[in-house]
């Protein structure tokens, strides 16, 4: 168990959605990378982005390497195996020729990726010829069939795990569109047939085979020669394959280091609409802050994980307790005790489902009516038939009438009012950007809303408001700095990306710390364009006037300056007072403890040190500051 | 604590017209005191009632007048008695004069503190303000109010007025009500007074701040429009969840006689090595590690500090965008508010100009924020304009945090248009839904918006503090049921439902809902055998049958039986199944039965082509699986069968299609030569003649 003491002091039932943070996913992916290592993979090249020639083998290997680095962060519970075929050496459980399963110590063939695997795989190209070797596996005259063997090995590797809980895939990298071209006659037919049957057998066992063909610029990979049958494609899908395969390669390389979550129902809830009419909904967590993974405490000497043990000790008797069953709150100088059951009972204010209260225009939902991330709801007909129909009807009405539904969500830990906002489906470039359904917004209670603006209401009457001219200048400025195609999630979190990069560098013992680009910084270049600068100057001039001095503006009026003045006076006084003590002598003779806290604070304030803490803390701070 | 000590005077109208809402007033005021007893133990609270039968206040003794105002409790530190008193307010018999009560309250505060004491002083008035106030001895009522207002400002008093209106005031004198409203409005304009109108009992519950939290800025500094222009702003929290109190763990180990027992529980953490659990590892020997795949990478704090992301404290503008680009459900957390530095008039103007321009053009601003130095991450958020409607409140921005790319999970959901037709609402259903959405209106024009978050108290907290108070008197008190008034938060308003009964009934009638028993495995096979929807009488099974079928067509469902619709495909799939050796045998056996059935059930040869297809498939399958005997025997058997049943036409049909036995060249195990195979059906014909002749 990874116990972080800070965590334990949090509310026992802090977040109902906490389960989505769970490390282990219910299903995982098992992938076998099947890489053609025939001499053709080394001799064929294509242009890389930087105009340099790269061998197909290099492309495949670097793609896998990138993908592994992402995967170890995204979905570290998924398992992978890397398997070359058309090799000189052989290494596989079946002892088949021409197939080499790449692996490192402390790891099974098909297992979770480790830092060591990534590190050694990174330099596979240098050692490949020597240790594994490349050689055509399908030669006329022999009945040797390396592709068949490779599929067999991959299928055998993927025997692990049940189809129900695991998604099994073979990713095949090759640039040979006709593997049996050197074979003639009946043998060719036979080899083709057995290989296809082998692939089909694998697919029947729930393994999907994906082809990542590598074409040369002068010669397209002809899928229809052989591989269309192997992966079971027909007609239009064929044409799409080449195109999508190219994208897939790119995708594998350019993935963001991002923890992936399986689409999972957080909770099945009943939405009661009126007079006993209830429909069935599933809730999903579409947006949740990603945290950089749990901390595990290690022994700094042995680097072995530590186990945290919690014990409860009675302060009065020192006796060791089991988890105490009662809690208390001091009230009117008494300790009022509550049992855990009673506390749960208090929180049970509703039946635990979503209850419709009515509808309101969208304008009633203010921007500050928000507390935590929204939850997505989508209908389900699994147990109540007709749910989807009602949901769609309400969804359409709400969209058309521009209304949201107000409902009470009686979850056991955080019963609260929610706004259900209908979201229409948004599709662009063939992809779904916003799924259709409703978003459940958590509304605050009156206790949660603060009326800060009123704090600065001016009792003498009106506060200054902008004039039309000033507003016009602001509008002009706004037009200049308009982000037209802004999409909410276009920035990656720089802190998180940095965290992952550092982790990778440390784990793989890379020497250089990678520089990460902070995408969230404003576009300085764009801001320096003359048009923007001009609009900015005009706006500045119109609201600030010609000679605006930020410091002078501060002095004189307002509460802020009063407090800052006061602070300044205290500091000045402290400097004066502090001068009348011989601090170093007091410190040397250990006489600091004879001074009062007020006196000690003179020193601290005069030297701009924090003044918080108990007397001992103040003394030690002074000593540290004096370097004693 | 002591610095924020507050003195509060409750001015409660208990006149006859208020009797209906007094239970709520009692509840909300006792809740206020209960919270003070925990969070602000040293606050002082006084209680003044007006509209009472009696009169008891100092002013009446000193100068006369001020009848029917009772100082029920002088200002003193909150205690349990006050809760008791508030829970049983006396019902008054006279119409209350709120101005008298305000003056009595002010008098108490002035006498107690004078002008110099800077402690926080607050008056809280709860009334319905439907009864006329007395005319002053000199000047107009307005003048009097203004004078009082000046006094309040001088003495630094705040006032909060809650005016209960709604159904109880329907019969009230409109003129008096309007006059009172104008008078109260003067207060809110000239002093730091807040005026709230509430209509429903719940709103009354929510209108009174039961716990005061002095706001603290989370950022003071520049909002950088660019490196050239900056606006001084202060950032506060706008919403922040008031959490359910965290209770301490209770130890009952101390003997009951020990009066000084703290009953506290100390929680102790010990870190132990997994291998050698006997030794406790001290803090300095521990190091933090993060997971990287199955392995844990140790990172020393110093090392981490050197490389971690360290943004500088700043709030920078990234740009503006259309408000439609930022969907509401992307707001991640509680909201903040950006206020221009109150002492800086030009900053106030700058914020005001931007806010108004944004509102006019429907734009929002995107900002990148680092609130403090040493903060380990940045926040990207959206500023939305908050244009103030009141003259004395400055314009400001609301701020909401937006997600990063890592925080958004791209799950795909089916498009509603692609769902089966039976799941799509028809026109009448859509109309019924439209009506429901229109009629179940919580914010009807001209009326108070029901259930506004600003006025909805947290029912959990109310229930907790009520139980706390009950338990303080009777330790074994049971958890009380949810307060009747607060039930309206968790359940729809019965009144609203009954008003719209016809709409709801229409909605219920037009939509059909059925519970479905969990699908069993056998169910699925059953459904496959009746794929054409012949199970109409089952009603609800219909949809799932279609759904299952559509799944069956797209993905490879395990076929366990040869069906009527696609026997050839079923056979092929079964033959190629590799999850058991028995499938080939079963497939061949089933196919033979199927062919027999087809031939036998044939009416004037209408099934022959289909039977032929099956035979061809069977033949091919038997060659592939090297089982020629199965096919050859079957064909012999079939021909004999046909002859017996006078179905010669089928044999002729086979001959015309040139179907032959499986020969040695096709399958090595066959005992039939090529010639034999070819002549099989040809030979048959004379045989038939022989038999018949």
Image: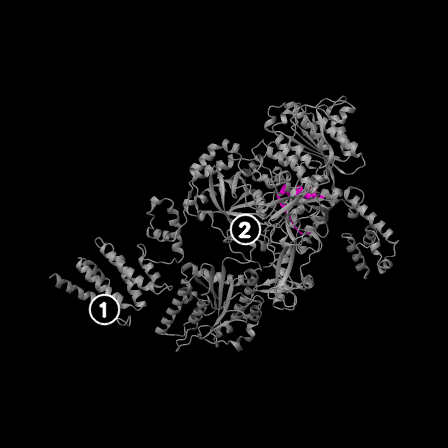
Whether residue A488 is visible, yes or no, is: yes
Q: According to the image, label 2 marks what residue?
A: A285
Disc 1 is placed on an element classified as helix
Q: Residue furthest right?
A: A580
Image mark for residue B264:
none
Please rate how many residues cluster around mark 1, counting C-alpha atoms within 10 Å: few if below 14, some from 14 to 19, many from 20.
some
The picture places residue A527, in percent across and down from the top left corner, at 68, 53
Query: Magenta stretch: residue B368 in it?
Result: yes
Q: Which residues are magenta?
A: B350-370
Q: According to the image, label 1 marks what residue?
A: B677
**Is the residue at mark 2 from the same chain as the one at mark 1?**
no
Give the position of the N terminus of chain A as an image quadrant: bottom right
Q: Residue furthest front?
A: B257
Q: Chain of mark 1?
A: B
The picture places residue B666, in percent across and down from the top left corner, at 28, 70
Disc 2 is placed on an element classified as loop
Say which of B381 and B266 sits in front. B266
Rendered view: A95 above or below B563: below
Rendered view: B505 above or below B576: above
The picture places residue A322, in percent across and down from the top left corner, at 60, 53
Query: Magenta stretch: residue A287 in it?
Result: no
**A532 lies left or right of A356:** right
Is the Cβ of the residue at disc 2 closer than 8 Å to that at disc 1? no
Q: Chain of mark 2?
A: A
Whether residue A435 is visible, yes or no, is: no
The picture places residue B465, in percent across and down from the top left corner, at 63, 40
Say which of B396 and B22 sits in front. B22
Q: Nearer the viewer, mark 2 or mark 1?
A: 2
Say which of A319 and A408 sits in front. A319
Where, by quadrant of the figure, is residue B452 drawn?
top right
**A558 lies left or right of B401:** right
């Amino acid at each position: 168990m990874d116990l972080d003491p800070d965590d334990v002091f949090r509310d026992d039932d802090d977040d109902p959605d906490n389960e989505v943070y769970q490390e282990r996913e219910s299903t995982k992916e098992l992938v076998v990378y099947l890489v053609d290592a025939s001499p053709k993979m080394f001799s064929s090249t294509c242009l890389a982005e930087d105009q340099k020639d790269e061998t197909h083998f290099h492309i495949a290997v670097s793609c896998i390497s990138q993908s592994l680095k992402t995967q170890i962060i995204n979905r570290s519970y998924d398992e992978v195996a890397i398997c070359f075929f058309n090799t000189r050496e052989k290494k596989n459980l079946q002892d088949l020729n021409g197939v080499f399963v790449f692996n490192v110590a402390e790891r099974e063939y098909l297992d979770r990726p480790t830092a060591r695997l990534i590190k050694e795989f990174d330099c596979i190209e240098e050692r490949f010829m020597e240790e594994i070797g490349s050689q055509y596996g399908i030669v006329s005259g022999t009945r040797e069939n390396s592709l068949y063997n490779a599929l067999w090995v991959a299928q055998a590797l993927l025997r692990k795990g049940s189809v129900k809980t695991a998604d099994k895939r073979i990713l095949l990298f090759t640039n040979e569109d006709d593997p049996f071209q050197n074979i003639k006659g009946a043998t060719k037919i036979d080899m083709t047939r057995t290989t296809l049957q082998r692939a089909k057998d694998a697919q029947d066992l729930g393994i999907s085979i994906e082809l990542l063909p590598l074409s040369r610029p002068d010669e397209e990979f002809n899928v229809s020669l052989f591989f269309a049958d192997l992966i079971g494609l027909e007609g239009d899908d064929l044409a799409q394959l080449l195109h999508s395969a190219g994208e897939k390669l790119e995708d594998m390389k350019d993935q963001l280091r991002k923890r992936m979550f399986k689409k999972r129902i957080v909770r099945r809830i009943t939405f009661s609409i009126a007079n006993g009419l209830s429909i069935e909904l599933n809730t999903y967590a579409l947006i949740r802050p990603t945290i950089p993974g749990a901390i595990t405490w290690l022994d700094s000497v042995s680097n072995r994980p530590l186990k945290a043990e919690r014990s409860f000790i009675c302060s009065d008797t020192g006796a060791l307790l089991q988890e105490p069953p009662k809690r208390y709150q001091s009230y009117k100088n008494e300790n009022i005790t509550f049992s855990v059951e009673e506390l749960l009972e208090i929180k049970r204010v509703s039946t635990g489902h979503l209850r419709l209260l009515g509808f309101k225009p969208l304008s009633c939902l203010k921007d500050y009516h928000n507390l935590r991330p929204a939850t997505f709801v989508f209908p389900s007909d699994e147990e109540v038939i007709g749910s989807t129909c009602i949901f769609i009807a309400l969804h359409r009405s709400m969209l058309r009438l521009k209304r949201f539904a107000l409902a009470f969500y009686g979850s056991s830990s955080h019963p609260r009012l929610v706004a259900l906002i209908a979201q229409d489906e948004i599709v662009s470039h063939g992809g779904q950007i916003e799924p259709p359904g409703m978003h459940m917004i958590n509304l605050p209670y009156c206790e949660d809303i603060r009326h800060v603006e009123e704090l600065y209401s001016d009792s003498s009457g009106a506060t200054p408001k902008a004039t039309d001219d000033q507003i016009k200048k602001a509008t002009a400025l706004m037009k200049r700095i308009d982000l037209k195609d802004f999409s909410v999630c276009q920035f990656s979190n720089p802190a998180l990306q940095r965290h992952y990069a550092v982790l990778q560098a440390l784990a793989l013992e890379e020497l250089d710390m990678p520089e990460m680009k902070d995408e969230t910084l404003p576009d300085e270049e764009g801001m320096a364009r003359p048009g923007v600068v001009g609009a900015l100057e005009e706006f500045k001039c119109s609201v600030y006037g010609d000679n605006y001095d930020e410091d002078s503006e501060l002095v004189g009026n307002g509460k802020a300056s009063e407090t800052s003045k006061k602070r300044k006076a205290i500091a000045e006084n402290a400097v004066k007072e502090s001068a009348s003590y011989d601090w170093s002598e007091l410190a040397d003779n250990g006489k600091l403890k004879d001074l009062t806290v007020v006196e000690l604070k003179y020193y601290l304030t005069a030297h701009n040190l924090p003044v918080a803490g108990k007397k001992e803390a103040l003394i030690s701070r002074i000593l540290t500051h004096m370097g004693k | 604590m002591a610095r924020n000590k507050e003195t509060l005077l409750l001015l409660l109208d208990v006149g006859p017209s208020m009797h209906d809402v007094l239970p709520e007033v009692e509840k909300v005021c006792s809740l206020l005191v209960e919270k003070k007893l925990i969070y602000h133990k040293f606050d002082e609270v006084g209680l003044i009632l007006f509209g009472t039968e009696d009169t008891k206040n100092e002013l009446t003794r000193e100068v006369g007048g001020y009848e029917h105002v009772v100082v029920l409790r002088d200002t003193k530190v909150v205690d349990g008695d006050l809760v008791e008193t508030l829970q049983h307010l006396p019902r008054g018999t006279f119409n209350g004069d709120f101005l008298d009560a305000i003056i009595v309250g002010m008098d108490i505060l002035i006498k107690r503190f004078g002008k110099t004491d800077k402690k926080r002083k607050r008056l809280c008035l709860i009334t319905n303000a439907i009864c006329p106030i007395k005319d002053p001895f000199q000047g107009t009522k307005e003048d009097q109010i203004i004078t009082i207002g000046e006094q309040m400002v001088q003495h630094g008093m705040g006032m909060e007025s809650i005016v209960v209106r709604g159904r109880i005031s329907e019969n009230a004198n409109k003129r008096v009500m309007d006059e009172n409203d104008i008078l109260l409005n003067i207060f809110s304009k000239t002093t730091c007074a807040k005026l709230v109108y509430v209509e429903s009992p719940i709103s009354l519950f929510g209108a009174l701040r039961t716990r005061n939290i002095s706001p603290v800025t989370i950022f003071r500094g520049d909002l950088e429009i660019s490196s050239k222009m900056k606006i001084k702003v202060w950032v506060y929290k706008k919403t922040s969840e008031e959490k359910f109190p965290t209770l301490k763990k209770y130890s009952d180990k101390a003997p009951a006689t020990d009066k000084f027992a703290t009953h506290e529980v100390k929680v102790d953490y010990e870190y132990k090595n997994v291998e050698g659990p006997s030794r406790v590892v001290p803090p300095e020997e521990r190091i933090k590690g993060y997971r990287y795949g199955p392995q844990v990478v140790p990172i020393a704090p110093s090392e981490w500090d050197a490389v971690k992301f360290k943004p500088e404290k700043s709030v920078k503008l990234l740009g503006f965008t259309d408000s439609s680009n930022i969907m509401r459900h992307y707001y991640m957390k509680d909201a903040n508010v950006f206020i221009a530095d109150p002492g800086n008039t030009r900053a106030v103007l700058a914020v005001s100009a931007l806010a108004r321009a944004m509102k006019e053009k429907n734009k929002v601003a995107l900002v990148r924020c680092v609130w403090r130095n040493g903060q380990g991450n940045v926040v990207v958020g959206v500023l939305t304009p908050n244009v103030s409607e009141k003259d004395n409140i400055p314009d400001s921005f609301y701020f909401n945090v937006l997600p990063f790319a890592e925080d958004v999970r791209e799950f795909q959901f089916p498009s509603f248009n692609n769902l089966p037709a039976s799941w799509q609402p028809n026109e009448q259903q859509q109309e019924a839904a439209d009506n429901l959405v229109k009629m179940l209106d919580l914010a009807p024009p001209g009326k108070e918006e029901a259930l506004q978050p600003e006025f909805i108290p947290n029912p959990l907290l109310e229930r907790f503090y009520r139980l706390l108070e009950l338990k303080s008197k009777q330790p074994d008190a049971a958890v009380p049921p949810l307060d009747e008034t607060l039930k309206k938060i968790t359940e729809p308003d019965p009144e609203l439902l009954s008003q719209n009964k016809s709409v709801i009934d229409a909605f219920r009638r037009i939509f059909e809902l059925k519970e479905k028993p969990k699908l069993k495995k056998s169910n699925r096979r059953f459904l496959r055998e009746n794929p054409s929807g012949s199970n109409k009488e089952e009603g609800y099974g219909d949809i799932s049958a279609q759904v299952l079928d559509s799944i069956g067509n797209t993905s490879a469902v395990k076929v366990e039986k040869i069906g009527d619709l696609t026997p050839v495909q079923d056979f092929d799939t079964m033959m190629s199944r590799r999850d058991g050796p028995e499938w080939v045998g079963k497939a061949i056996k089933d196919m033979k039965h199927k062919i027999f059935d087809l031939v036998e059930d044939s009416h004037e040869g209408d099934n022959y082509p289909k039977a032929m297809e099956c035979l061809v498939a069977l033949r091919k399958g038997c060659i592939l699986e090297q089982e020629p005997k199965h096919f050859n025997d079957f064909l012999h058997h079939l021909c004999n069968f046909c002859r017996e049943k006078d179905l010669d036409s089928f044999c002729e049909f086979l001959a015309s299609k040139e179907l032959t036995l499986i020969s040695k060249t096709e399958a090595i195990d066959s005992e039939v030569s090529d010639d034999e195979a070819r002549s099989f059906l040809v030979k048959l014909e004379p045989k038939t003649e022989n038999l018949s002749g």
